[in-house]
Amino acid sequence: MFSGLFRLIRYSGLFMLFITVLAFPGRTLLAGSEATPEYKLKAALLYKLTRFIEWPQSDNKRFSICVLGEDVFGKALDSLRTRKVKGLPIEVTNYRYSDAITKSCQILFITESKQIFLKNILNRFHNKATLTISDIEDFAEQGGMIEFTRGMKKIGFTINLKQAKQGQLSIAAPLLQLATVIDAPQGAK
Amino acid sequence: MKSVHALSPLALPLLCSLSFNALSIEEEPLDAFLDLNLEDLLSMEITSVSKKKQRLSEAAAAIFVITNEDIRRSGVTSIADALRLAPGIQVAKMDSNKWAVSSRGFNAQFANKLLVLMDGRSVYTPSYSGVYWEDQDTILEDIERIEVIRGPGATLWGANAVNGVINIITKSASKTKGGLFVAGSGDEVDNFAHYRHGFNLAEGVDGRAYFKFKQLDSSYATDLEQQAGDEWQSLRAGFRIDGNTESDQSWTVQGDTYQNDLNQIIRSKWLDPFDSDNSLPFQLENLNDKFESNGHNLLARWENPLSEQSLTSLQFYYDHTERQEDILGQEITTFDIDFQHRYQGFEGHDLVWGLGYRHIEDKFDNTFGVGIDNPDHLTSELTSAFIQDEISLKQDALRLTLGSKFEHNDYTGTEIQPSARLLWKAKPGHTLWSSISRAVRTPSAVERRGNIVGFVIPGLGPVPTLVSTVEGSEDYDSEKMTAFELGYRITPSEKTSIDLSVFQNDYDNFLSFETTSFGAGLDFSNIPNTTLYPSKVEFDNKREVTARGLELVFDWYVEEDWRLQTTYSYIDITDTIDSDSNDDISAEVVPGSTPENHLSIRSAYDFSQKLSLDVWVYYVDELSASAYSVDSKINDYSSVNLRIGWRPDDNMEFSVTGHNLNEDRHAEFVGENFITRTEVERSIYAQFRLDF
C-alpha cells in the first residue's frame, strides 16, 4: 500500500510545486525569520520615535536605519521599507560588525550581542548625527542616546539628552515627557 | 559559533522558550502598529516574566549551537549529517540508512553515551542503547537550532547523558506562519519534497502541519563491488500547536508519525544448526533484508508562571516505535512525565528542581541470531529527581552551579549524578569555566539479557556442533564516568570569537567482553583436529578508560559578507583492563573507533543578497577498528562540499549542493557483522524552496 503512495508522491512533486505557485499568487511574500513580539514592538517604536526627533539638515536621499549585531528584528523591519520618514524612503541595513558601517545612519540600533564592544562603537559614532538606540542595560548611562528599558510587562525609554545634543539632534518635548531623561557624558559608567 | 545566540538556559531543558502574552502583537502584522500613537505602543504589554536569556558565551559547559542558517547553508539533508558541523561530535555514515554518531569518543551504530532529545522528547533507545538516526527527522527548515553539549549533562538530563546531549529544538508555531514548499532531486538523495503550512488557529494560538517525503539511493558495497542495495524512502507527517493564555501560561502540543521503508544487505546470518530445516554451513551470506521502521509520538507541555520569579513546567509525552529487521524485531512504547520548577526569588540564586517518571514497554521478535530473554513484554520504570542552584558571586562575575540528579532504574537501582560548575567572567569578552561532574550509562536490555550468536562451527563425526554466543549478564552494571572540563571563550573583536575546551573523562566499570566458557570445535583448516573456541562471552565491566581531548572553534567574519568557521577536535583514548579480565575482543575498538583528529573549515560567502556560495571542507582521521566482529580499519579521509544558492526573490531559493566532491567514494565506518561494508559516494542535488 505504501509503495504505491510513495510513487504517487514522487511523481506528483512537480505538480505540487505548480499548484503551490498558482494557488498563492501575489500574496505578501515573507522571508527571513519572524521576530518575537518584543522586537516587533521595538520595531514599531523605532519608527514612531522618528516623529519626535529632528536631524540636522543633510542631502540624504534616504532615511537610513542601521541594525548592528544579531538579526533580532527578522522580518519585523520589512514593513518599514514601504514607509517614509521626513519625506525620505526608509532603508534598513543589517551589519554584523561596526567597521562595516561606511555610510551615514540616521538611526543605529545596537543589539545586545554587541554589549562588550559598546564603548568602541559609541566612540565611533560620537558627535555624529546618528541617533543611537539599544536595549543593552545602562546603554544611556554609558553614552548611548536612547535606551529601551523593560518594566514588568512594558517597554520604556531612557534618553541621554547630553549625547543627543552633541549629535545635534533635537528631541521633542512630548517624547521627553514619556521618558526618563538623564545627562551623562560618554563612558560615565 | 556566534556568541550572540540566546540559548535556552542550560539549566532548563524544558523551560526553553520565552513565552509572550502579547496576543495582538504576536498575531497582527507590524503595519497595524505603525499608525498607533506612541503612548499606545508604550502601553502594550509584551511579557509577564522578564526572563534573562542565557547567552552562549556565559554557559559553564562546552556548548555549540547549530543554527537554522547553518543547516540551510551546509546543504545537509539529515539531522545526523548536520551534526558534522559541531566540534567534538563524531558522525560517520555506515550505509545509506545508518549513522554512527557519538560525542567525545566511542563511536558505534549504538553509541550509547550520547543523549538525544527532540523538543524535549528522548529519542535514545534504552533497550538497545543508541539512536536510530534514520528515524529522527523533521522539516529541517523548521528547526530553530540544535544545541550540542559535549560532556556530561547527567545532572539535568539523567542517565546516558554521559558524553554529551543533543537538543534538537524546532521553531514555535508562531514563527512558522505561512507555507513552505521544498523539493529537490539528485543522484544520492534521489527525490525529496516537503510541505509545511502554519496558521493562526485562534487568538493566541498558532499551529503548523507538515508532510515530508524523501527517497535515498544506495551506497557502494566494498566487498560486493557493486551498489549496496540499501536504498530507502521515508514518509513523515506532523504538527505543532503553540498557545498562550491570558494569564500568561503557554502550552505546546506536537506530534509526528513516520514510516521508513529500508533495505540492507546482511553480511552474515547464522542459522540454528539444531533445526532440521537448516543445512550446512548454517550461515546465509549477503542476504537482502527489506524492512520497515515506523513510529509516532505525541507531546504536550504547559508552562505556568506563578510569579515573576517562579515558573513551572509540566511535560508529558508518548512515543511508540517499531522496527522489523530480519535479525530482530523491536517494538518500544514510552510514556514520560516531567515536572520542573524554576525559582529566582532568593537574591543571587537561580534554583531549578524537577521530578520525572518514565515507563517503557519493550517487545522483541527474537531470531536465532539475536534475541532478548523473556522477550514478550519487558517493562521498565525510571523515576528521577534533580535540583540545581546557580549562585552569583562577586556581582555576577563569578557563578557557581551545584546540582545533582537522583535516578532510580529497574536494573541498577539508584544512581546519583552530581556536578559542580564554575564560571568566571574575567573581563568583557573573556569567560573562563570549569566543571567536575559524574554521569552513568545504565545497562541496556541487550546487555542484561541479550543473546547474540557470534559464530557456528558445524560438527563432524564425534565432534559436536559449536554455537558461540555473546550474552547479557544480570551482573552487568552501569558504566560510571567522572569528567573534568575546562573552557575559555574569548571575543577579541567584533569579527572574531574563539572557544576552547579541554577535558578528561575517567570511566570505570567500562564495558568488557569476558569469555566464560570454551568449547571444542572442528578446526576446518586442519581436519580432523579440534581447537578450543570461546563458546560463551558475557557483557562485563572489567575495564577502565581515560579519554582526554580538546576542541577549538574559531569564528571569523573576514568581511561583512564572508564568514569562516574553523573547528578542530582532538581526542586520545587509553584503557586498562582488570587483571582478571580475558577480554581480547574489544581491546582494539575502545580506542580505535574514534578519529584522533578532526578538522572542519566552513566558508559562507554572499556575493550579493541574491547569490551565495558555501564551501565546507573537513578532514577525519583514520579509525584503527570500528567493529568487534570484523576487520574494520578505516582510512582517514577528506570531504569537500559546495553549495550555491540563488534567491531571485526574498521568498524563493534555488540551490545546488555537492557533497564529497573530491573523490568517487570513501568508507566512514564499519558496523558489526550484520550489515555489509559500504562506502559513501559523491553526491549532487538541486533544490527549490518557496516561502509563501
Image (spheres, coloured by chain):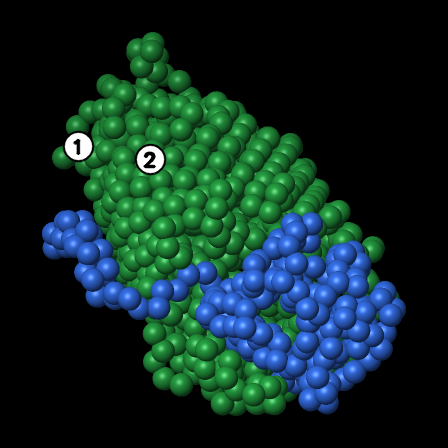
Please report the residue visible at 33 percent of the width from the left and 11 percent of the height from the top: B525
Name above or below for residue B159 compared with residue A144: above
Q: Which mark is residue B68?
A: none
Q: How many marks?
A: 2
Name the residue at the top extreme.
B526
| Front-lying residue, B653 or B292 | B653
Q: Is residue B338 visible?
A: no
Q: Secondary structure at mark 2?
A: strand
Quadrant of the rendered image containing residue B673: top left
| Front-lying residue, B361 or B355 | B355
Residue type, mark 1 in image:
Asn
Residue type, mark 2 in image:
Ile
Quadrant of the rendered image containing residue B524: top left
Q: Which residue is mark 1?
A: B278
Name above or below for residue B421 compared with residue B271: below
Quadrant in which the C terminus of chain B appears: bottom left
Q: Colour of chain B?
A: green
Q: Position of residue A131 (x, y in %)?
A: 70, 69
Q: Colour of chain A?
A: blue
Q: Position of residue B394 (x, y in %)?
A: 86, 66
Q: Which residue is mark 2?
A: B684
